[in-house]
Amino acid sequence: MSINIGEISVPDLPVFFSMFLTIYLIAYFIVFRNWKPQIRPEASSCLISIFHGTPAVFLATRAVFSSSSRTFASANTAAQNTVLDFSVAYFFTDLLHYIVFNPSDVLFIGHHLATLFVFLTCRFLVFHGACAILGLLILAEVTSACQNAWTLAGARKSDPDSQLAVKVYHLLSPPFYAFYSIVRGVLGPLFFVKMVSFYARGGAHGVIPNWLWISWAIVVGTAITVSILWIWNLWIDLFRERKANQLGQDKKIR
């Protein structure tokens, strides 16, 4: 797909990539210029995630429900391809961020490469299955705004000059954990099972090869498992912290 700029038609993907890269550079050199050097890259990554996550949810929802055919094997529509391009551009930009600033973070680099594999094969190889992929995208990004606010607050909470960040972090943690747990721990697996069942019954026979949907299932299943383990560990840390604080208060009272 392409975007018309005057009389010139420019493909979506490079336009979206240029947009996310520009947002990242503005965040790094202007918006967060007074933040500590160690957290400026992470904060800049959060800002491009904010510009991707919530818009992607609305764009993907509209693209899916505006289509007359909404099965997991339906041919991609122009609107769905545009959303895929939008997300590919974001993940590629964020992948560059990790390669430059956190090359040892193999987990996130692997996650982004696997996600790009799913998006790119759906978009440019089989031209089908966008309803399934965008459904997963909606579930993945619906928690994005809350997660990025929590992440930014967490990045600043160790700064003694930013007591507001500490308050925001502790205020956001329980509702964010609960929201994330429902989406990634309940709705995500349910959607995943529905998708895999559809493909396993041969619902996409002739349009999406078995090796490809199985690859998608491995990527998505792994991502869901890692997400559940991540939020589980956060809950454990939260309860341990609260228990420690309670014990500390009890000792003061005595």
Image (tube, helix red, strand yellow):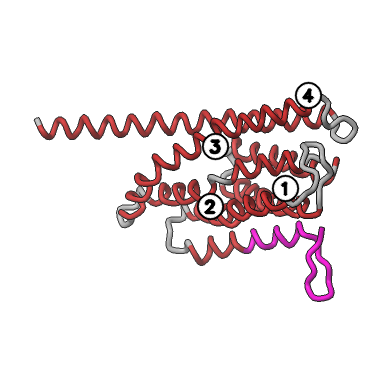
Which residue matches tag 1?
Answer: 64
| 3D distance between C-alphas at marks 2 and 1 | 26 Å
Q: Position of residue 161 (x, y in %)?
A: 31, 57
Specify whether 2 is left or right of 169.
Answer: right
Name the amino acid type tagged 1: Val
Across and down, in percent, residue 137 comes to: 65, 43
Could you tell me the amino acid type at mark 2? Cys
The three-letter amino acid code for the residue at tag 4 is Ala
Image coordinates for residue 9, horizontal then vertical, percent? 83, 67
The image quarter in which residue 173 lies: top left
Residue positioned 55% across, 54% down in the render: 50
Going from N to C along the chain, the mark reached first, 4 or 3, is 3
Q: Would you call the spot at circle 3 few (<14 residues within 10 Å), some (14-19), or many (20 or more)?
A: some
The type of residue carrying mark 3 is Val
Residue 73 locus on image (x, y percent):
81, 37
Can you identify the residue that label 2 sits on? 46
